Amino acid sequence: MNRPRYESLGEARTALEERLSSGLVDRAFEAVEEAAEELVSEYELEGEVDINEVTKWLQVSFCESGVMFVEEGIWEDEDHARGIIEDIENEPVGNAQMLVGAQIGRGRDMMLVSGAMLQRQYSFDG
């Protein structure tokens, strides 16, 4: 599987809207925005990261995954995508954590989020 890599949110959104309805993409973006806010709060990064940057790159990550899943036949129809969006709505922090990994190199804010996640994981493992 080849995961596409988009350099802008507009490019990513357009690619996903070519495969899913714009209403479903809107819902996904809203869910990811809320998940980003909860993630930043969970790791106490308010004031340290730009929430708009974190949200943007998590939305790009969702689009990259979504395009790949549609092209690979994993999401056979919009019901599969809808189920993933519902998962994000129901478990925002855990799902946002998964989206972070693909975006770690997207700048200071994403590196800080990833670092906070790793620091917590290793402090609990210690």
Image (cartoon, rainbow, N blue to C red):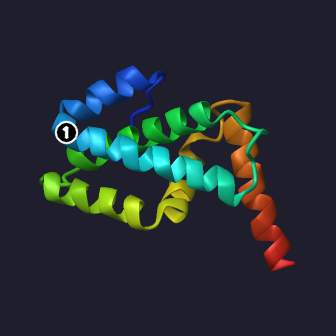
Give the residue displayed 48% in from the left and 22% down from the top: 7
Give how far across and how far down residue 22 sits, in percent.
Answer: 20, 34
The residue located at (81%, 69%) in the rendering is 122
Residue found 58% across the figure and 55% down from its top: 38
Identity, as a three-letter code, of the amino acid under mark 1 = Gly
101 or 95: nearer the eye?
A: 95
Up-down relation of residue 42 to residue 70 (above or below): below
Name which quarter of the figure residue 51 lies in. top right
Where's residue 31, x and y in %? 39, 50
Residue furthest to the left: 77
The answer to which of 51 and 63 lies nearer the viewer is 51
Helix or strand or loop: what does disc 1 sit on? Answer: helix
Marker count (numbered) = 1
109 relative position to 3: left or right: right
Q: Is residue 98 above or below residue 57?
A: below
112 sits to left or right of 78: right
Mark 1, residue position: 23
Answer with left or right where residue 115 lies relative to residue 28. Answer: right
